[in-house]
């Protein structure tokens, strides 16, 4: 993972859309099409683990369903963008409580981006906490691309 990819994700997670788009345009094709999606997937995994696993125990299905419902209700366009079956399935799969979600890669990535934003917004990270979270995501992504 490059520092540029981390900075791009940081801007996205902080809701700085203008900066996120500017930084995303500066990524080369490989960074934008391979590395950055891997970083988003890694951050999604880290965020799901942080939110839904406590004391080594995964949350139950109802907690996941409630989270997805709240994420869909939060924004006017979210009900059209977040498919609850895909969103819940992706989270439950990471918790070891469901099968692999059958959908295309573009839809998976879109759901990861939206759900990641919802998960991070609930955390109210300080800058050092966001740095630690991004370092964890970077480590996971580096392992993916190993």
Image: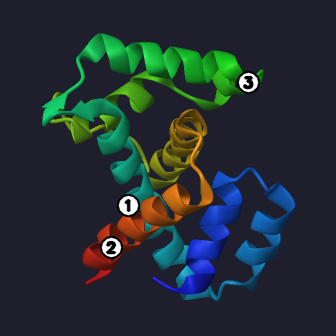
Neighbour class for label 2 at 10 Å: few (<14), some, many (≥20)? some
Q: Which is nearer the N-term, disc 2 or disc 3?
A: 3
74 and 78: which one is in front? 74
Q: CA distance from mark 1 to mark 3?
A: 24 Å
As drawn, 56 above or below 146: above
Label for residue 42?
A: 1
Q: Residue at x 50, y 52 (%)?
A: 109
* Residue at the spot of label 2: 139
- Distance from disc 1 to disc 2, alpha carbons, whole Å, reads 8 Å
Query: Could you tell me residue 75's position as x and y percent?
Result: 73, 24
Is 94 drawn above or below residue 2 in the view shown?
Answer: above
Residue at coordinates 23% horizontally, 17% vertically from top-left? 60
| Contact between labelled residues 3 and 2, with CB atoms less than 8 Å apart | no
Q: Is residue 32 visible?
A: no
- Residue 75 — which label? 3
Q: Secondary structure at mark 3?
A: loop
Choose top left, top right, bottom left or bottom right for residue 48: top left
Mark 1: few, some, or many residues within 10 Å (few <14, many ≥20)? many
Q: Are marks 1 and 2 in contact (CB under 8 Å)?
A: yes
Mark 2: which secondary structure?
Answer: helix
Camera-side residue of 113 and 30: 113
């Amino acid at each position: 993972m490059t520092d540029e990819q981390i900075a791009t994700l940081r801007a996205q997670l902080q809701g700085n859309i203008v900066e996120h788009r500017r930084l995303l345009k500066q990524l080369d094709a490989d960074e934008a099409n391979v590395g950055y999606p891997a970083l988003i997937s890694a951050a999604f995994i880290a965020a799901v683990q942080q939110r839904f696993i406590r004391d080594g125990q995964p949350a139950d299905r109802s907690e996941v369903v409630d989270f997805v419902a709240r994420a869909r209700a939060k924004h006017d366009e979210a009900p059209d963008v977040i498919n609850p079956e895909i969103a819940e399935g992706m989270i439950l799969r990471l918790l070891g409580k469901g099968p692999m979600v059958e959908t295309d890669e573009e839809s998976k990535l879109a759901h990861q981006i939206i759900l990641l934003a919802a998960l991070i917004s609930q955390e109210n990270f300080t800058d050092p906490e966001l740095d630690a979270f991004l370092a964890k995501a970077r480590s996971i992504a580096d392992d993916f691309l190993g």
